[in-house]
Amino acid sequence: MKNLWKCSIAVFSMILFLTACGGENDETGSESSAEEMDSNSEEEGGDASEEGYNGESYEWTIGFNTPEDSVRDVAAERFKEIVEEETNGNVTVNIQPAESLGSEQEMLEQIQTGALDFQLAGGGSMQNIIPEYAVLQLPFMVENFDEAYAVLDGPIGDELKSLAEEADYKILSHTDLGFAQITNNVRPINEPSDLEGIQIRSPEEPTSISTFEQLGASTTTMAFTEVYLGLQQGVIDGQFNPLDAIYENNFHEVQDYLAMTNHFYYHVNFIMNLPLWEELDPELQEVVQTAAEEARDASREFTQEVDEEMRSTLEGEFEEITEPDMQPFKEAIDYSEFSETVDQDFINKTQDFIEEYREEN
């Protein structure tokens, strides 16, 4: 019994020793593993808190009047992608297309009051608030995309941005929309007289209304989302828009004739409420500005690609597509008529810039 007892004590002591040693090794091993993981994490990713924007969080909304997959939507999606990625999700962007927040003019008012954060608004719509924004949309002002971009990205565009700030709009960039063409259900358009008596839908833009009235058409203003029904029901005979807008909104389904006139160049202003911009810290301002410029470039690439594709896509969708000699149309326009809306000196300054650009290029 005595020997058995001694043996039991010896075994029990050995168990205690092994347990103690094992616990010490486990603790040491855990600390070692944790230290190795921390070291690896620092080597692989560095200090995550130093990467990207980690400041105040925001939830922003962008509104516009055209549907999903339009060029405005392309710009908005690119902006959203960059902002959310560069801010590590601290800033989120909601996209509201197709006038879900109101008409273009109503959204412009919302931007001005701070009820809406961002808008992709047509250059023509801005003219009701800042008349100079109509200048590039005067008929036949520019002949191609390069001329338009030179105006918007140069001193004329900078002056427009400054004028916008006086009305509490921050213009981040000028995105693209393209050249407008005419569709109607009355007759093919080959010369100005063919427009006489045709009821054309126009946005609420004084210069657009004046242009078509000078060319002999009658004009009716209505919201963009109502145009298809208006054409279908015969409330209006025709409309004018870039080819992708004509196709995306199915106007070709309810129109017989397409005239390739390139009479207006349309751009879109990427607008932000100015007080909201001013409250952002410089780091976030840089993210927003970069994203807006990327959105501009995406829209321009999209517009030029689609402009080429849409002509062939729409080839069989109309009874007739005409390519009028535009000189008689240009001669029918009296630019002094626009001076009531746009300062004549600003028109002259823009025309001089375009002429100089043409001479240099």
Image: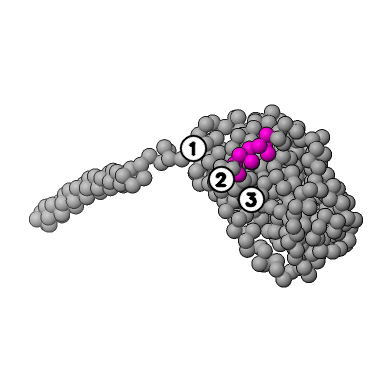
User: Percent x, y for residue 234?
Assistant: 88, 61
The relative height of residue 126 versus residue 18 in the rendered view (above or below) is above
Q: Is residue 146 visible?
A: yes
Instruction: Verify whether residue 60 appears in magenta.
Output: no
- What amino acid type should be assigned to the residue bearing mark 1? Asn
- What amino acid type should be assigned to the residue bearing mark 2? Asn
The answer to which quarter of the image holds residue 239 is bottom right
Residue identified by numbered label 2: 361
Q: Secondary structure at mark 1?
A: loop
| Mark 1 neighbour class, 10 Å CA radius: few under 14, some 14 to 19, many 20 or more | some
Q: Which dot marks residue 54?
A: 1
Residue 16 in the figure: left or right of residue 301: left
State the residue in front, 294 or 287: 294
- What amino acid type should be assigned to the residue bearing mark 3? Asn
User: Percent x, y for residue 21?
Assistant: 19, 47
Lower sequence index among marks 2 and 1: 1
| Mark 3 neighbour class, 10 Å CA radius: few under 14, some 14 to 19, many 20 or more | few
- Disc 2 versus disc 1: nearer the observer: 2
Lower sequence index among marks 2 and 3: 3
Residue 156 in the figure: left or right of residue 285: right
User: Percent x, y for residue 282?
Assistant: 52, 31
Residue at figure coordinates x 88%, y 55% from the top left: 196
**How far apart are labels 2 and 3 at the CA level?**
12 Å
- Disc 3 versus disc 1: nearer the observer: 3
Q: Secondary structure at mark 2?
A: loop
Residue at figure coordinates x 66%, y 37% from the top left: 352
**How far apart are labels 3 and 1 at the CA level?**
42 Å
Q: Secondary structure at mark 3?
A: loop
Q: Which residues are magenta?
A: 349-358
**How far apart are labels 2 and 1 at the CA level?**
45 Å
